[in-house]
Image (cartoon, rainbow, N blue to C red):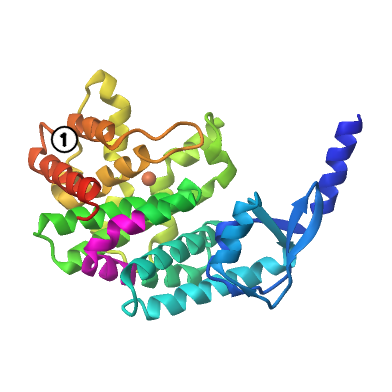
């Protein structure tokens, strides 16, 4: 009983406060509110409102075993506003400065703001900001292909929850492959990048904690299964997406579904790929590779080699040229550190 009473007592101490991952404070520069941490269940002030806050401060907190902080519940909108402002300003000046730092910062701010969008998918202002920022980021990435590898490495180390980081990682690979193919126009690459980045916003229908579970309830499973359709209903008529993009989002799991059927060797590729082009294939395949080579709470990452082995089974018969291109891209990407 003593233990249960203590747990209840500790819980009471954080009531009225909201936990935040340290990553969410990156680039804040000045604390918009008091920030606390929990020391044996007692909330202790870590930083006072209106004080300078650097990424180095945040790293030092992490080094001293602080994995999350707390803010008062009513202060959360101040953090959101600050990060939206950061993303807006950074997007405006994305062509100025050192490419690795610019690319890394845009990746981090996009991810933080995507989390806010998952928490509030009716927010038109936030969706428009994300759309404009993703669009500018695609131009940046097309023009700075040599820094993709460094951005990937730095960003992966931050270990954002995978439902927020997966769109960025898979879309980063996507634009690298399209550029590597040397046959796509800048506009085509931009369109594919935007489609890829937003294709999973329907995953917001389930709370983030549930994605850490190995087994979902039948209702959650159904919601997850329908996430592509849910993405379309969230996005349609709110950001500029053409009919092909909508169809690609609807069908982006064509190959992931096939991975589950591989044991039966029922490789039955939908005609959709022929209609909407190889970009659809690359969007789906980069999604699978980015997922496989990164850890999940319920499984470890596989090697790039293992993931390419699976992709080979999916593509080699009907799409040998596309498979060769993918292998060639990743070989260069992970051996030379540039695409
Ligand atoms: Fe998806």
Judge by depth and name the residue closer to the eye, 223 or 323: 323
Residue at 76% from the left image edge and 52% from the top image edge:
38
Question: In the displayed structure, would residue 305 be above or below residue 329?
Answer: above
Q: Please, what is the dominant secondary structure of the magenta stretch?
A: helix
| Residue 150 among those drawn in magenta | yes
Which residue lies at the image location 15% right of the left edge and 49% below the top edge? 278
Q: In this view, does 110 lie above or below 330?
A: below
Whether residue 206 is situated above or below residue 117 in the rendered picture: above
Q: Is residue 128 visible?
A: yes
**Residue 3 position within the rendered picture, expressed as x and y whole percent measured from the top left:** 86, 32
Where is residue 206 drawn, in percent x and y? 54, 45
> Visible in this render: residue 199?
no
- Quadrant of the image containing the N terminus: top right
Tell me if 68 is positioned left or right of 234 in this view. right
Image coordinates of residue 203 in percent, x first then y, are 47, 48
Which image quadrant is residue 143 in? bottom left
Q: Residue at x 19, y 68 (%)?
A: 187
Q: Which residue is drawn at 27% across and 37% down?
A: 255
For label 1, the SS is helix
Answer with left or right where residue 46 lies relative to residue 242.
right
Residue toward you, 15 or 97: 97
Residue situated furthest top in the rendering: 264
Identify the magenta region: 134-152
Q: Is residue 199 magenta?
A: no
Q: Which percent across, then down, holds residue 221?
A: 49, 34
| Circle 1 crowding by C-alpha within 10 Å: few under 14, some 14–19, many from 20 | some
Q: Mark 1 points at which residue?
A: 315
Mark 1 beta carbon near ligand 1 (under 8 Å): no
Q: Quadrant of the C terminus?
A: bottom left
- Report how many numbered discs are placed on residues in the image: 1
What is the quadrant of residue 243 in the picture?
bottom left
User: Where ligand 1 lies, by quadrant?
Assistant: top left
């Amino acid at each position: 009983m003593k233990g249960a009473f203590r747990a209840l007592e500790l819980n009471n101490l954080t009531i009225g406060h909201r936990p935040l991952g340290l990553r969410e404070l990156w680039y804040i520069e000045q604390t918009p509110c008091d920030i606390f941490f929990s020391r044996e269940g007692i909330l202790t002030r870590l930083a006072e409102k209106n004080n300078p806050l650097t990424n180095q401060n945040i790293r030092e907190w992490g080094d001293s075993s602080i994995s999350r902080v707390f803010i008062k519940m009513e202060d959360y909108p101040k953090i959101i506003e600050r990060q939206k402002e950061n993303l807006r300003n950074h997007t405006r000046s994305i062509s100025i400065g050192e490419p690795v730092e610019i690319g890394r910062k845009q990746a981090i701010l996009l991810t933080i703001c995507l989390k806010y969008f998952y928490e509030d998918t009716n927010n038109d202002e936030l969706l428009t900001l994300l759309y404009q920022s993703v669009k500018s980021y695609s131009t940046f990435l097309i023009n700075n292909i040599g820094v993709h590898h460094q951005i990937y490495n730095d960003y992966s180390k931050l270990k954002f929850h995978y439902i927020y980081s997966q769109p960025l990682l898979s879309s980063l690979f996507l634009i690298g492959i399209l550029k590597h193919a040397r046959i796509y126009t800048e506009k085509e690459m931009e369109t594919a990048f935007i489609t890829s980045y937003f294709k999973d916003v329907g995953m917001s229908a389930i709370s983030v904690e549930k994605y850490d579970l190995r087994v979902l309830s039948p209702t959650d499973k159904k919601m997850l299964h329908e996430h592509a359709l849910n993405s379309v209903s969230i996005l349609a008529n709110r950001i500029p997406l053409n009919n092909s993009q909508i169809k690609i989002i609807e069908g982006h799991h064509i190959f992931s579904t096939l991975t589950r059927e591989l044991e039966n060797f029922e490789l039955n590729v939908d005609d959709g790929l022929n209609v909407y082009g190889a970009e659809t294939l690359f969007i789906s395949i980069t999604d699978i590779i980015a997922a496989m080579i990164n850890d999940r709470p319920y499984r470890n990452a596989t090697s790039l080699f293992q993931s390419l082995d699976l992709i080979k089974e999916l593509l080699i018969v009907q799409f040998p040229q596309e498979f060769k291109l993918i292998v060639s891209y990743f070989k260069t990407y992970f051996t030379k550190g540039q695409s």
